[in-house]
Structures are given as C-alpha cells and as structure tokens.
Amino acid sequence: MANPDVMQTEGATTFSFDEILTKAKKLYGYIDTIFSMDPELKAFLEDAVLKNKSSEQFAKELTSTKWYITNGATIQARGFSKRQYDSLVKNISKDDPDYINKVKAAAGDTDYWRGLDTTVASLEAQLVAKGISYTPADLNAWAAELYDTGNEKNLAYIARWLNTKIGFASATKGTGATDMADITAYAQDQGLDVNKDFSQSDVGGWLQRLDKGESLDAIKKEIETRARIGESESVQNLMNQGLSRKTIYSSLVNRFNTKLQRADGTMNDPWLQANAKDEKGNLLTGYALDMKIMADPTLDWDKTDEAQDTYSNYTLRILKDFGLTGGR
C-alpha cells in the first residue's frame, strides 16, 4: 500500500502520490476519490501511471480488480439510473432558486433520485457531526460521489473519505474546532502563523490524523520542529527545557516595543531576529539591546519621547556647564 508521503519511483524520477493523481487525471480523465482511499485501487493507479499505460489498458485492467468485481454490477446499475435521471433534469438550471423542488418533481420517482436523496440526508448529518464546512453544491456533489460508487453505506470508507474533506476553514465548528484552536495557539507561541506558515494540506493532514486518533502532542512536535529552523543553539536549548519561543523572546520584545514606543513588534521582527543575539547566538541583555536600538538610525529611536527628553537634558547640562542658565 502506497503512502502519500513516500515517493514512488519511475526511473530516476520520483513522484508523491499527489503527483501520481495529477498525472492519472491527465492520462485517464476523471479519477474518483476511491482511488486514493482503497489500497488495491491506489496501488493499481500507481502502477498504471508509472508504466504509462494507455486509457484503454487502464479501463480493461480495472475490471479485473477485486474492487471492480465486487462493486462493478452496482456501479453499472447506478450509471444507468443516473443517465435516466440526468436526461430528466438536464433542462433545469442549477441557478434556479427552486432547483431542488423542480428536480424532485421531474425525477423524484426514479431510483437514482431516491438513493441520492437518502445519501444527501445521511451525509449532511455526518458532515455536521464532524464540523466539516460545506456548501449546498458541495453536499450534492459529495453525496453523488458516494452514491455513484456504491459507497453510501460503507461506513469504514466514509470515515476515511470524510477526512479528505477536512481543512482549515472546516475547523471553525464541530469536533475539529477545539483541536484547531489548540494548534493555532501553540503555533503562535512558537512564532508561527497557521494560515501563513503552513499549507492547507498541512492543516488538513493534521486534522485527519487527529480524527484517526493521533495525539495533539505529535502535531505540536511537528510545529516545534518547524519553529526551530534557523534558531541559534542557545534558543534551541531553552526550547528543549520546554519554553516556547514566545516566552524566550518576550522580555526582549517588550524592551523593543517600549524603547521605540511601539506595540506591533514580535519575536519574528526582522530587526530583532538580526540583532537580538550576540555573535555566538546568545540572547542579548536588555541593556545591550537598548544600546543597539539607540545606535541604529533606521529605527528612529531619536524621534521617541525618551530620546527627546535625553537630548533636552543633555543640552541643558551643557548650558549649565557654560553658565548659560540659571541652574547651579
């Protein structure tokens, strides 16, 4: 069984399973989700793509798979009833506000409508339970995908299949919301933004793994590993002690913001990352950081209230030294 993270080989070239899918769609047209979910079909697809089999050979050999032998008759029957259904609803615009009622009136007596309608209701309940966001178009398309392949009652398949529909936007409600909030907060503590520093597939993969029972700690470890990239040994040693990057940098970030009368500086500020450590990678003391801030004209420290007070007091002291003021 292929793993999406394991590269498949074709001569000197390697492909991830996602790349296999992309190539398969170019070679054979529409490729159903079942090919990435069923172990036998997954291996079959990889073999066909890596050997560059023709679409005719692909279709012929597909009928010899155990999956097809088990499900082929059902799928063929569904295909026939779907063609009947499609012919009855082809003139009804999907943009029509009364689309569902018109489709039901035209094709409500067909086997396909009844099966699809039942699948829609069942699938919607499962999507809501798992907190997966969807549009009406998504619901109808996904239900059709399950029903057309004869998987509407295959609970084990549906559980895996639903995981492919989980994404960052999906985790705003339901069972994924708490996990996503925890992941987002942890990433922020490590100086990372889930939306910017990780891809949709990263986040979707985490939620799928959590849904399968993997622990949050495993996901957090991956985030921490990403946060360590580029950090000095001294900071990584502090992280080894259980401190987050936010905690490690907090005093210097506060010093930076206070010194410059700002509130938007973070541990990832480019200037801080370039100047908050000495040549050995050790974090500076607050005083040493202050000196760097005051000496760098690009930071405009001289425009702060502190700077103006400093300059004013310095000027006053000079005037006193020359006896040009009334002070003693």
Image: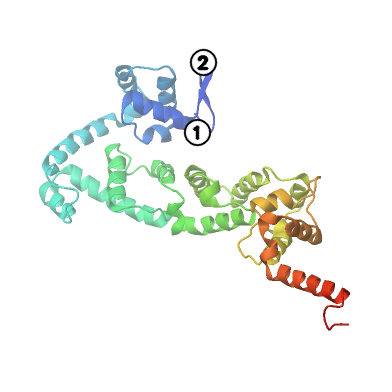
Q: Quadrant of the C terminus?
A: bottom right
Image quadrant of residue 112?
top left
Q: Position of residue 251 (x, y in %)?
A: 73, 62
Q: As shown in the figure, which amino acid type bears the numbered disc 2?
A: Gly
Identify the secondary structure beneath mark 1: loop
Q: As shown in the figure, which amino acid type bears the numbered disc 1?
A: Pro
Identify the secondary structure beneath mark 2: loop
Q: Position of residue 18 (x, y in %)?
A: 45, 32
Determine whether 120 is above or below 146 in the image: below
Report the mark closest to the observer, 1 or 2. 2
Nearer-N-terminus badge (1/2): 1
In the image, 172 versus 125, the foreground residue is 172
For this view, does 256 lie left or right of residue 82? Answer: right
In the image, 173 versus 80, the foreground residue is 173
In the picture of the structure, the residue carrying the numbered disc 2 is 11
For this view, does 17 lie left or right of residue 237? Answer: left
For this view, does 198 lie left or right of residue 319? Answer: left
Q: Position of residue 97 (x, y in %)?
A: 18, 56
Residue located 41% across and 24% down the image? 44
In the picture of the structure, the residue carrying the numbered disc 1 is 4
Residue located 70% across and 48% down the image? 274
Within-10-Å neighbours for mark 2: few <14, some 14–19, many 20+: few
Residue located 37% across and 35% down the image? 34
Q: Position of residue 71 (x, y in %)?
A: 31, 32
For this view, does 110 lie left or right of residue 197? Answer: left
Asked if residue 41 shows in the view, the reply is no
